Image: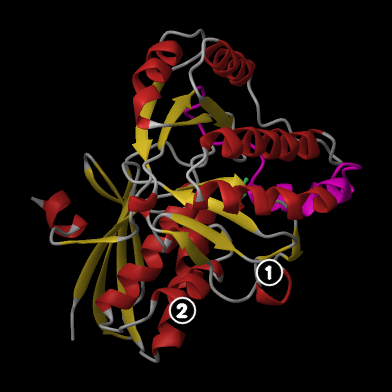
Amino acid sequence: MTRECTYAVAPNIAFIKYWGATDLDSALPRNASISMTMSECASTTSVRCLEPGQPDEIWLAGIDGLVAAEGAFRDRALAHVERLREYAGVDHGLAVATRNNFPAAAGIASSASGFAALTVATLGALDKEVPAAELSVLARRSGSGSASRSVMGGYVQWPDGEDAEGPAVQLAAADHWDLRDVVVLVQQDEKKVSSLDGHRRAPSSPHFERRQELLPDRLAAVRSAIDSRDLAILGPVIEEDAIELHLIAMSSRPPIFYWLPASLTVLAAVRRLRDRGVEAWATLDAGANVHVICAPAAEEAVVAEMENLDGVHGVLRDRVGSGPKRLDRSLFAVTSS
Ligand code: DP6
């Protein structure tokens, strides 16, 4: 049996957002969503098998070594480890070490990459060969619905309705279309209201049902834009859907304001770029940071425009990625040396 396994898994940025659920305990979405899996941002997770009966361990790997995880994150990780152990039909303890190379819980889908990485690394450590579709379902059951999309590379759709329980499906591989995601950081600390609370409150917004009516056309437009690699079609639709998510959040009861003043500064800068003929479009998950989606040729202009704006702490250059990567090095070894 493989005793240890390490994976790096990237977050994904939703082009059409999952916002609102029919069953939050099982993370079943009210609407289908489409995302692009990222590449440079990543959650790296090592899982090591312990002896049967030994208690599970959850560690955060930082520059000073391993620190025991605490609070809600620890509880969610332990519950998911238990779920995966049951699925695999084993009884020994598991030690988990994990780290992100980007700010967590600030609109860069750290739960998606974190729970997807925990899922693939645990099953790898247990030497279980699990098809990607099954990994997607298992990752979703962590409660982070968007994790179901991060086990796939490229452009991914997570269906709704009767298919919501099923896996997310790849619409196109990463090499189909080289899109860039310049993540403009205006917030480094964690958002105050979780996505879970956002999903819970979403139906109380008067705009929630209206969005459901608009989504079938929007989803079709995004699928077709991906198919034909057409940023002029994709861009306006993804920007519109992101703004509508925040409109719903701001008009929920009680309201949620994820944006910071600098988020608006960045949105205005993206519009200025377009006025100058640079094709760049903004989207935001449940956080204040802004993802600017563009073609490779526009990336330098986007970075140059964003870097020196008031309230911007920095930019991360990311791009479409090909999905989970198994690594040879272990976070247990790296941090104890
Ligand atoms: C706005 O319930 O998957 O990012 O568990 O915090 O990752 P986390 O959130 P989840 O909701 C994601 C909401 C979203 C849109 C999206 O990714 O589709």
Q: Residue furthest left?
A: 337
Viewer-proximal residue, 325 or 297? 297
User: How far across and how far down the image is residue 48, in percent?
Assistant: 24, 71
* Mark before the other along the chain sequence, 2 or 1: 1
Q: What separation in Å lies between label 2 and label 1 (alpha carbons)?
A: 19 Å
User: How far across and how far down the image is residue 68, in percent?
Assistant: 35, 54
Residue 187's disc number? none
Residue 25's disc number? 1
Residue drawn where x is 36% and y is 81% of the image: 130
Magenta-span inclusion, residue 159: no
- Does the image show residue 49? yes
* Quadrant of the frame with the N terminus: bottom left
Q: Residue furthest bottom?
A: 89
Residue picked out by circle 2: 134
**Element at badge 2?**
helix
Q: Residue furthest front?
A: 228
Residue drawn where x is 46% and y is 68% of the image: 78
Kind of residue at badge 2: Glu
Magenta-span inclusion, residue 203: yes
| Circles 2 and 1: CB atoms closer than 8 Å | no
Q: Quadrant of residue 113?
A: bottom left
Residue drawn where x is 60% and y is 38% of the image: 233
Q: Which residues are magenta?
A: 186-211
Residue drawn where x is 58% and y is 39% of the image: 234
Viewer-proximal residue, 314 or 72? 314
Q: Is residue 25 left or right of residue 311?
A: right
User: How far across and how far down the image is residue 251, in percent?
Assistant: 85, 35
Viewer-proximal residue, 164 or 169? 169
Kind of residue at badge 1: Asp
Indicate yes or no: mark 1 CB to ligand 1 under 8 Å: no
Q: Give neighbour class at mark 1: few <14, some 14-19, many 20+ (Cα, 10 Å).
A: few
- Work out whether 297 lies above or below 149: above
